[in-house]
Amino acid sequence: MSGILEGIRVLDFGRWIAGPYCAHILASFGAEVTRVERPKGEDDRYLMPVTAHGEGAQFLQCNGGKRCLTLAMTSDEGRAVMRRLIEQSDVVVANYSPGALKYFGLDYDTLKSIKPDIILASASAYGSEGDLAERIGFDGVGQAVSGAIYLTGEPGSPTRAATAPIDFSTSLSLAYGTLAAIIGRMKTGEGAHVEASLVGTSLNITNQILMEEATGFRHREPTGNRSPMSSPSDIFRARDGWFIMQVIGQKVFARWCKVIGREDLLDDPHYANDDLRGENGADLSAIMQEWCALKTRDDCIDILNKANIGCGPVLSPAEVMGGAMDLRATYMREVDFPNSNPVPIAPPPARLSRGAVPVSRPPLLGEHTDAVLADYGFSTDEIAALRNGGTV
């Protein structure tokens, strides 16, 4: 099955999430993606191991649909191989600091000197401008410096998100920027440098709160699970478990008041709009908590769903994987991996009615080295020499 990006060649030098997941998205649209690793493999391959070979969950999620070439990138022979690969590729994906990009010969000026219409998709912690550009950072740093961690959790106890929202959001941004650059090259014949940063992403996510701060309209402090922007929007405890409910907008608030038998709240000036309900949300959360305390979680969710009020159970990972709400069956697919049990992987979230392709399993280390080199024009003797010399 051909995809929209069939014929687009991508070299993926990415590590961890931001770069690899971007390349994975391109693969899901049909691009030919080759992950390039050092001969002994990269650290991100083995974090959170779940296979017989030691591949980790993060690697499996971010590297489906790719081939893998091992290469000693900093040797003279390795750099010569890289040059030949770049000459025949359309996109290079890498997430390094600007200085590291230059060290590996993956900065845009170097790539453009090899192939003038190349597209470089790069991600870093702080971007390429300013005094902080060379600093290293992961998802948590983005959360921390944007104000997100300060505002999460209870007062006096800043809390990091358990997942990696900044990494994945940066990767999604890098992917759509790369798609735009591909379209641009089709129109003009010119390549581009597509750049995204963890901090730039995190500041986008907290931008609304930062605007309030900068304009002096409001100074936010952490409020735990309760939303300070609207209410009742909180996590509540039913008789047998927890659930979340989010009441946003006047119509939804009116429906909620009717559900709990408190339509008198509609005339209370403290709750006249979302801002006021957010400011007085502790009282509304207390009212909701009293309503649900003796009901089962399922009963609460059923009643609220029938009233068209957004809600859902707080599920543990075990509940999700055990089939709760059919999430595993609907949103994940079981992917076979050599000598291992199938692993459940969620495909990229954007689905196309046409032009996407079924993504194959992530590659073993160096699994396609010979095939990739052959496809890029290396002869059998050249490949043998590279192997004998330890370059691949």
Image: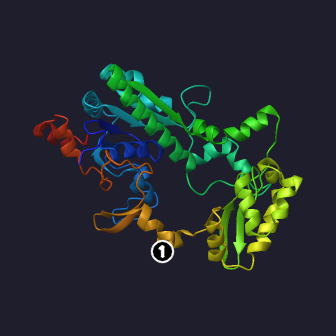
Residue 305: percent from left, percent from top: 62, 66
Residue occupying the point 43% across, 48% down: 350
Q: Quickly name the residue at label 1.
A: 322
Counting other residues with Cα less than 10 Å from the Cα at mark 1, is it few (<14), some (14-19), or many (20 or more)? few
Residue 253: percent from left, percent from top: 74, 57
**What amino acid is labelled 1 in the image?**
Gly
Closer to the camera in the image, 145 or 26: 26
Closer to the camera in the image, 328 or 146: 328
Counting labels gives 1
Left or right: 88, with 211 as reference point: left
Residue occupying the point 43% across, 39% down: 175
Q: Element under label 1?
A: loop
The answer to which image quadrant residue 194 occupies is: top left
Closer to the camera in the image, 163 or 262: 262
Outermost residue on the right side: it is 269
Residue occupying the point 49% across, 31% down: 195
Q: Is residue 102 visible?
A: yes
Left or right: 387, with 334 as reference point: left
Closer to the camera in the image, 127 or 214: 214
